[in-house]
Image (tube, rainbow, N blue to C red):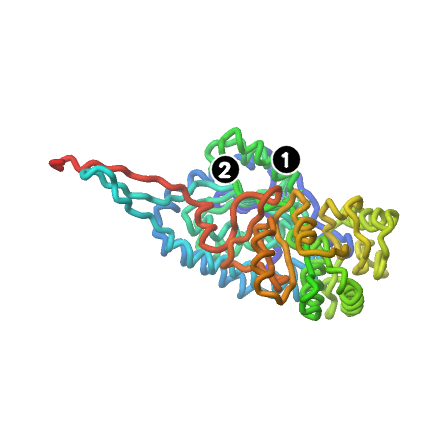
Amino acid sequence: MDLRTDCLVAGRWVRAASGASDPVTDPATDQPIAEVPSLARAEVAAAVDAAWDAWPAWRSRTAADRAAIVARLGELLLREAEPLAALITREQGKPLAEAAGEVRYAASFLAAAAAEGPRVRGETVPAALTARRITVLRQPVGPCAIITPWNFPAAMITRKLGPALAAGCTAVIKPAPQTPLTAMAIAELAVEAGVPAGAINLVTGDAPMIGEVLTGDARMRKLSFTGSTAVGRLLMQQAAANLMRISLELGGHAPFIVFDDADLDAAVAGAVACKFRNAGQTCICANRFLVHESVHEAFVARLAEAMDGLRVGRGTEPGVSVGPLIDDAAVAKVRGHVADAVTQGATLVRGGEPVRFEGLADRFIAPTLLTGLTPAMRMHAEETFGPVAAVRSFATEAEAIAMANDTPYGLAAYFYTRDASRLVRVAESLEAGIVGANDATPSAAEAPFGGMKHSGLGREGGHQVMDEYTEVKYVSQILTDATT
Ligand code: ADP
């Protein structure tokens, strides 16, 4: 695949007429990779026009037709898995093996959407009047604004775009400024897959301006956003003016509870997978380890040992499991959280320091393990979004549940136990949209991913996702020749 660096509007690949552009850099080296357009307001508005104009024809295609195109897009992602993974690693930094995993994960959402699209069903309802017939239809909601973050440059797009297209919606995509190139590559594959001109559009440039245009036009019927709670809240306010339908996947602050009856080997393996994937930069990464006091010492010792096996480095290097953080602000935040915890009495068991490599940017942080986490520490309240595991101990199940739920977030929560009754009790008590019970990597296209409380609204994946891209309409019909 050639490196695509343009926006897609109404089926044409475009640069900004003004020539304005923004750089995309490799987070591992700080070296520029490409310049992408910084579109003007009117150019973003043209994408809205295109999505609106393309909608009637796209929604009129059969669900099977649309599903075939969405499925084909998934196949094309897999065909181009190698170059796509390399591109993800280049602009986002994650290790190549993880990037390849993301491509497969991204493709799985397209396959799932292709399967779910033709299964969107209406119903008939027995009416209370003899002459009345009530038919319930599900119809595409309309042009969708899709705004995505940088941590999963491919998957965060496909899990919105797949169901949107399959349902009969059109889209304007705004990728994260750090990772627009993967989005552009996917858009190019969408064209090859047969998505018609205007059914998908991709814009880059000033984020607040694009957000205003996409939420400020009443023809845009739906906003699907993944990103920070602060921006999600702002976009929800903006979208309120047009009462846009919204799906928000926001921040998380996942507790990871290890009970005294847990299989500690499984808990440690799960902790490593859950915490250090993408260098800790996922919204469902464990952010607070709550460990029963009787197994605290053993768990910490085994986790520290397992962490010694993690290799930090550039994502392109074979065997690397922890890549760079996305940018300097991310590094500053993680280091600030660690310094704050240590100042407030936490014990540093492993890491805590930057790792420096000749010729690479100063973005690498050693996998870090802290004990003695307390509620006063910043990392107890805020998402760290870095390779830092902080542990706090607890004495009773009730205390663990109270600690776990003591956060405004409610995306993922994990716990390890071998007690069947406890498993059910705890799963039912946790205030999170995704509960991993002895499962530290629960994301899957067939499951309804999403958060409670400040972690968002709506669900992505599962059959539930089709509800997000369809409207319910009922037709109440009186049979005019009926006698009763
Ligand atoms: P993160 O902190 O992970 O970068 P953000 O919420 O800032 O998360 O970004 C997620 C996405 O939201 C990105 O595509 C970003 O450009 C976009 N974004 C940020 N601010 C705005 C805004 N005011 N309006 C629309 N999109 C925005």
127 left or right of 274?
left
Return the residue found at the far top.
241
Q: Residues within 10 Å of mark 1 (few under 14, many from 20)?
A: few
* Towards the viewer: 452 or 333: 452
Q: Earlier in the sequence, mark 2 or mark 1?
A: 2
Which residue is pictured at 73% across the width and 45% down the height? 382
Task: For residue 310, say whether it is visible.
Answer: no
3 left or right of 242?
right
User: Hey, which quadrant is residue 456 in on the image?
Assistant: top right
Indicate the position of residue 179 as horizontal and vertical percent values.
Answer: 65, 50
Under 8 Å from ligand 1: the CB of mark 1?
Answer: yes
473 left or right of 51?
left
- Residue at image mark 1: 208
- Residue at image mark 2: 48
- Give the SS element for disc 1: helix
Q: Amino acid at mark 1?
A: Pro
Which residue is pictured at 79% across the width and 49% down the height? 374
6 left or right of 377?
left
Which residue is pictured at 86% across the width and 56% down the height? 347
Measure the C-alpha gap from mark 2 to mark 1.
16 Å
Indicate the position of residue 396 as horizontal and vertical percent values.
Answer: 70, 56
* Towards the viewer: 476 or 255: 255
| Quarter of the rendered image showing ligand 1 | top right
**Above/below status of 59 relative to 26:** above
Indicate the position of residue 422 as horizontal and vertical percent values.
Answer: 60, 60
Indicate the position of residue 214 as horizontal and vertical percent values.
Answer: 54, 36
